[in-house]
Amino acid sequence: MRNYQKELEKLIEKNQKEEKVPSLLLHSCCAPCSSYCLSYLSQYFRITLLYYNPNIYPEEEYFKRVEEQKRLIEEMDFLNPVSFIEGSFDPQEFYSAVKGLEKCREGGERCFKCYELRLREAAEYAKKGGFDYFTTTLSISPLKNAVKINEIGEALAEKYGVSHLPSGFKKKEGYKKSIEFSRQYNLYRQDYCGCVFSKKERDSI
């Protein structure tokens, strides 16, 4: 099995030897997950964070999460600059992407379509903006399939002609560190992934 963290470390080492600080379009799912990713990656990349999550339900939950993301970026210190883009919020984009998969289990095919929807938006932004790389914070979660996330990212990289940054952010205690950052910055940590289906599953427990 591929070790995406090791691949990332080799890429970072190569860029450092060449004294490069590449640009990175980083898709974020939420402030808590982005905290460690930003702290780590901003040492080596100039980051533009894209908050694009049309899956989030209900609407007030979306706005709560996006404001936490903005606050975190304002309050954190970074070695290299981090800027912010808020993508569009049209839940119909999510419902169209997962049509026919509404009854799938959490973590299955419906989630893979959701990964693809958000990563495609990141790839398109990266292509238009001339970024060196794109990736997502999603792989930091123990509940997310990092292999699938990277497979989708690599397929989109080939399609759009922009490099995908390998991501295995739960490695090196990434998830644990994100919890520590959440405490440090008093971040709102949601108790469901985001969509109406994950909320229903949470509510049924």
Image (cartoon, rainbow, N blue to C red):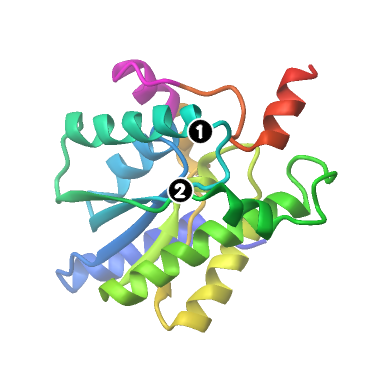
Specify which label sits upstream in the sequence, 2 or 1.
1
Magenta part, dominant SS = helix
Residue 172 is covered by the magenta coloring: no
Residue positioned 36% across, 67% down in the render: 125
Query: Is 31 positioned to the left or the right of 203 in the image?
Result: left
Q: Against 100, is 133 above or below?
A: below
Q: Rounded to the nearest whole Å, what is the CA distance between mark 2 and mark 1?
A: 9 Å
Residue 59 — which label? 1
On the image, which quarter does residue 65 sit in? top left
Residue positioned 20% across, 50% down in the render: 83
Q: Is residue 177 visible?
A: no
Query: Is 55 positioned to the left or the right of 67 in the image?
Result: right
The image quadrant where one finds the C terminus is top right
Residue 89 — which label? 2
Q: Amino acid at mark 2?
A: Phe
* Part of the protein shown in magenta: 178-188
Q: Against 38, is 203 above or below?
A: above
Q: Amino acid at mark 1?
A: Glu
Q: Secondary structure at mark 2?
A: loop
Check whether the beta carbons of the residues at disc 2 and disc 1 lie within 8 A of each other.
yes
Query: Is 94 positioned to the left or the right of 52 in the image?
Result: right
**Image position, residue 2 (x, y; %):** 61, 62
Q: Secondary structure at mark 1?
A: helix
Query: Is 89 positioned to the left or the right of 77 in the image?
Result: right
Q: Against 185, is 58 above or below?
A: below
Q: Is residue 127 visible?
A: yes
The image quadrant where one finds the N terminus is bottom right
Are there few (<14), some (14-19), or many (20+) residues within 10 Å of tag 1?
few
Are there few (<14), some (14-19), or many (20+) residues within 10 Å of tag 2?
some
Closer to the camera, 105 or 34? 105
